[in-house]
């Protein structure tokens, strides 16, 4: 596999996240003051990702460098630093939209953020371990169980009494967590399968890295767009409310 393809994917991740950050910052001014935190969180999430993708795309001298197998594997800790920061923020952003429906119960955010941290930390330990080892399997199971717990909690949230645009946003954001986040354990499992099957470790890591870039762009930028659009519609609705 031409490792320059991996570098191109990292560049794609950087550009997409940077563009998302600019868009969220510009959209912030269209929101009511009490709803601007939605766009702020969306911008912070993509900004953090943009910084780390900038570092990852520059793992070799650029331009003109040649990325190596070790370079690809060295980006794994950076990806997990990104996820450790941004995935809790994504869940906070989700709760901000749920709050528009008045459906936030005590302890909701704490439970899902703790589960998220467990998911990321055990995912990292599993990816850094020996392919096919018992410890890797255990870490993978724990990480997946934490993700399933998050899904269970967010599916129990009742927003039936909320405006249609809020209900729609919550449904779509749930799908990001259920389907969009599923890409990560699938990518990890694929990498593990390729390595156990005798594939070159660098090839397996490169395939997984490219999958993660696409997933990151969809799950961070797409998630933020849904949240900001919901906040924008709520802002318009509040402007139309008759004065007391």
Image (spheres, helix red, strand yellow):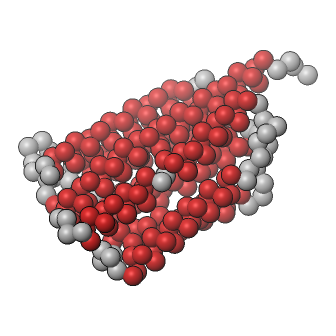
Apparent side of residue 1 relative to residue 48 in the rendered image (left or right)? left
Residue 116 at what x, y percent from top left? 55, 61
- Residue drawn at (26%, 71%), measured in percent from left and top? 196
Q: Residue furthest front?
A: 197
- Residue drawn at (39%, 76%), measured in percent from left and top? 136
- Residue drawn at (37%, 62%), measured in percent from left and top? 188
Residue 228 at what x, y percent from top left? 59, 32
- Residue drawn at (26%, 64%), measured in percent from left and top? 194
Which quadrant holds the C terminus? Answer: top right
- Residue 2 visible at all: yes
Apparent side of residue 218 relative to residue 197 in the rendered image (left or right)? right
The one of 105 and 58 positioned closer to us in this rendering = 105
- Residue 50 visible at all: no
The one of 189 and 24 positioned closer to us in this rendering = 189
Residue 203 at what x, y percent from top left? 20, 58
Rendered view: 35 above or below 7: above
* Total marks placed: 0
The answer to which quarter of the image holds residue 62 is top left
The one of 150 and 40 positioned closer to us in this rendering = 150
The one of 177 and 197 positioned closer to us in this rendering = 197
Residue 165 at what x, y percent from top left? 69, 29
Apparent side of residue 108 relative to residue 142 in the rendered image (left or right)? right
Apparent side of residue 234 relative to residue 37 in the rendered image (left or right)? right
Q: Residue furthest bottom?
A: 134
């Amino acid at each position: 596999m031409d490792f320059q393809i991996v570098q191109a994917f990292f560049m794609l991740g950087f550009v997409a996240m940077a563009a998302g950050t600019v868009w969220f910052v510009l959209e912030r001014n269209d929101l009511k003051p009490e709803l601007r935190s939605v766009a702020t969180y969306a911008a912070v999430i993509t900004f953090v990702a943009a910084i780390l993708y900038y570092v990852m795309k520059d793992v070799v001298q650029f331009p003109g460098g040649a990325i190596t197998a070790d370079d690809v594997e060295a980006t794994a800790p950076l990806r997990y630093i990104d996820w450790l920061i941004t995935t809790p923020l994504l869940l906070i952003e989700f709760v901000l939209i749920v709050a528009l429906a008045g459906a936030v119960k005590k302890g909701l955010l704490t439970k899902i953020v703790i589960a998220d941290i467990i998911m990321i930390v055990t995912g990292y330990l599993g990816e850094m371990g020996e392919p096919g080892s018992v410890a890797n399997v255990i870490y993978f199971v724990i990480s997946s169980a934490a993700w399933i717990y998050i899904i269970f909690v967010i599916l129990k949230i009742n927003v039936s009494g909320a405006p249609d645009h809020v209900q729609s946003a919550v449904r779509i954001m749930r799908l990001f967590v259920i389907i969009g986040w599923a890409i990560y354990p699938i990518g990890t499992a694929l990498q593990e399968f390729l390595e156990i099957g005798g594939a070159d470790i660098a090839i397996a890591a490169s395939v997984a890295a490219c999958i993660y870039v696409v997933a990151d762009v969809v799950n961070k930028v797409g998630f933020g767009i849904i949240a900001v659009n919901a906040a924008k519609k709520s802002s318009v609705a509040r402007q139309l409310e008759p004065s007391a």
